[in-house]
Amino acid sequence: MSKKWIAVLLGSLMAANTWADEASLKKAVEATYPKVKVESVTKTPYAGLYEVFLDGQIIYTDEKFSFLIAEGRLVEPKSKRDITGERMDELTKVDFASLPLDQAIKVVKGNGSRKLVVFSDPDCPYCKRLEQKELVNINDVTIYTFLFPLEQLHPDAANKSRAIWCAPDRAKAWNDWILSGQLPKAQGTCDTPIDKVTELGRKINVTSTPTLFFSDGKRMLGAYPAKDIEKALGAAKK
């Protein structure tokens, strides 16, 4: 959420009326900032706070819309539970079973019993770090890599994605590139799912790489350490 966005919203709060329920509060937020889509408004058990899920983020306010908490965290003091983090995990979950895994590169490590999806850009330095430093230390997992070139950042990423996808052995081609920087010598042409994956990414709000999804639908953004990925893989199997 940008500072400009917050400034516009805070300026509008000065003229806000009393909003007695979730539906009215939703209308108030949308009227204040019409370009933002409000997904849900939910009253929390914390001191009259209302949770507003909008534009992929959570803000908090009261029924009068007289203040908000943005770009912050709501924490339960006694247990130290990160309420905001837990809610974001739930609100940004995906239906793992519905993901079109046939449009991803499949790499099986060990017995492959655990499942992990990664949206990755071939030219993303953090994606390379994730593969070279973290995923190499994880075993007994099947990794499905969706090639997700961010062309505005990496103009040649789409070409590399096509070369890797069209290789006779996609898993080998991906590992050769991401681990050793070697593209397939014979860069053949074929139909690729890159456009479909781009649309899928938009649908499930993938905005950066690497983005990881676990079998319980929860996501992780960035090149997290292997121990954190292991923890999430274990939690997903429970």
Image: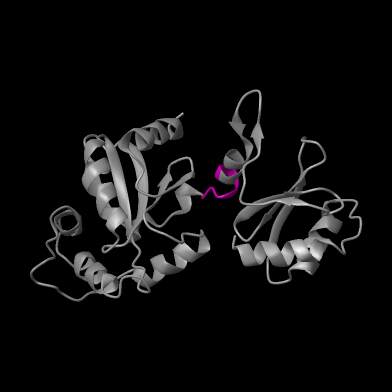
Asked whether the viewer can see residue 108, the reply is yes
| Outermost residue, top side | 78
Q: Say how many tags the image has.
A: 0
Q: From the viewer's perspective, tell me whether residue 62 is left or right of residue 135.
A: right
Query: Please, which residue is most extreme toward the left here?
Result: 185
Q: Tell me what residue is drawn at x 16 percent, y 65 percent.
A: 167
Q: Position of residue 27 (x, y in %)?
A: 82, 63
Which of the pair 13/233 is nearer the observer?
13
Residue 10: image quadrant is bottom right
Residue 103 as seen in the image, left or right of residue 46: left
Residue shown at the point (45%, 62%) measured from the top left = 201
Tell me if 176 is positioned left or right of 222 in this view.
left
The x, y position of residue 172, in whole percent, is 15, 55
Counting from the top left corner in percent of width and height, residue 63 is at 85, 49
Task: Choose between 145 and 179: the one closer to the eye.
Answer: 179
- Tell me the quarter of the picture where residue 122 sits: bottom left
The image's colouring method is one colour
Is 47 displayed left or right of 98 in the figure? right
- Using the rendered image of the protein, determine whether residue 191 is visible from the camera's viewpoint: no
Residue plotted at (43% across, 41% down): 215
In the image, is residue 112 above or below residue 181?
Answer: above
On the rendered image, what quadrant is the N terminus found in? Answer: bottom right
90 inside magenta stretch: yes
Q: Is residue 177 magenta?
A: no
Question: x, y (%) of residue 153?
Answer: 35, 70
Q: Which residues are magenta?
A: 89-94
Of residues 190 and 147, the one drawn nearer to the viewer in this rendering: 147
